[in-house]
Image (tube, rainbow, N blue to C red):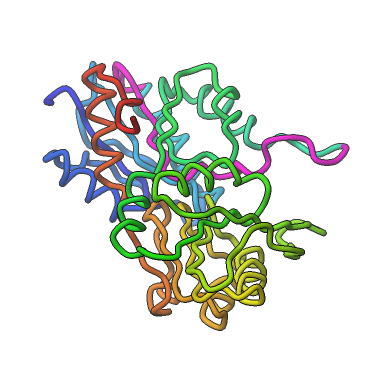
Amino acid sequence: MGGMIIFSGNSNPDLAEKVCTYLEQPLGGAKVKTFSDGEVQIEIDENVRAKDCFILQSTCRPVNDTLVELLLMIDALKRASASRITAVIPYYGYSRQDKKVAPRVPISAKLVADMLTTAGADRIITMDLHAGQIQGFFNIPVDNLFAAPVLLDYIKENFLNDLVIVSPDAGGVERARAFAKRVHADLAIIDKRRDAPNQARAMAVVGDVNGKTAVILDDMVDTAGTLIEASDALTEKGAKEVYACCVHPVLSGPAVNRIIESSLKSLIVMDTIPLTSEAEASGKIKVLTISKLFGEAIIRSYRGDSVTSLFV
């Protein structure tokens, strides 16, 4: 695979190293620094002319800095005559702002898609987009990977009897139903009403959770307000133990403290976003790696093989 080079920004270097280890490829040389006033400075230290380049960068905290790093790296590779540039974005920032929810608000996910395309990206590889329609915001190919195989293996190995998969809101029912079917578990739904952004109140539990081990399934956890409300509602309805699985551990603001102080047994997350030291030390958050999935997707994209067959 001498025609392929993997680069990484500063957002998730550990994941980039794991992906490169799986691919048995060295990480491409690039300096990603800042000037004294905070401007991002990029310098590519590899000859990329006529090469297939992949930039692995989650647009996570600090979101604007990591996004600009990604845009400038794409621009640098384009100007250095790379044959194809693929932005590998394990966590796609601004994905929650995917529609107009009120007058005079932006559709930020669409704007970010336009910026990536204008910068020169030829393809996007990402994971568990908050809304599937975001793929349609791009005029270039998008491979939306799913962490389901990794999560399913973990659930099958660690949760056996009296299991119920719980969707924390109506929007996640399809995902939870698919998981429940694959692990032969029951399904429950939390009826949630959101009063304001990052503020949610769990109202009722639809489904039987009494005496069962409940596993809440979500695509991301931000301030953990929804998660804790759901956990409390399940405990009140007689759930024996409550666990949670999510793909993207945003974990901003009071999230870690809320999780530590809650009745939640543990939170299982992917390494699409690196954990803070506080989250790592909490003892309640377990990280599973999705490096093999991204590594395999990169290989298949490079060779022109099917990526969809990874999830069949």
Identity of the residue drawn at 47% across and 34% down: 71
The reply to whether residue 37 is in sight is: no
* Residue 130 spot, x, y in % from top left: 57, 42
Identity of the residue drawn at 73% across and 64% down: 202
Question: Does residue 47 appear to the left or right of 179 in the view shown?
Answer: left
Which image quarter: residue 233? bottom right
311 vs 221, nearest the viewer? 311
Question: Does residue 113 appear to the left or right of 89 in the view shown?
Answer: right
Q: Which residues are magenta?
A: 79-103
**186 over 8 or under it: above or below:** below
109 vs 43, nearest the viewer? 109
Quadrant location of the C terminus? Answer: top left
Most prominent secondary structure in the magenta stretch? loop
Does residue 101 belong to the magenta stretch? Answer: yes
**122 over 7 or under it: above or below:** above
Which image quarter: residue 78? top left
The reply to whether residue 77 is in sight is: yes
**306 over 270 or under it: above or below:** above
Quadrant location of the N terminus? Answer: top left
Does residue 211 belong to the magenta stretch? Answer: no
* Residue 184 spot, x, y in % from top left: 42, 50
The residue sitting at the right extreme is 103
* Residue 257 spot, x, y in % from top left: 56, 79
* Residue 168 spot, x, y in % from top left: 62, 57
Which image quarter: residue 159? bottom left
**194 over 142 or under it: above or below:** below
Question: Does residue 16 appear to the left or right of 146 in the view shown?
Answer: left
276 vs 64, nearest the viewer? 276
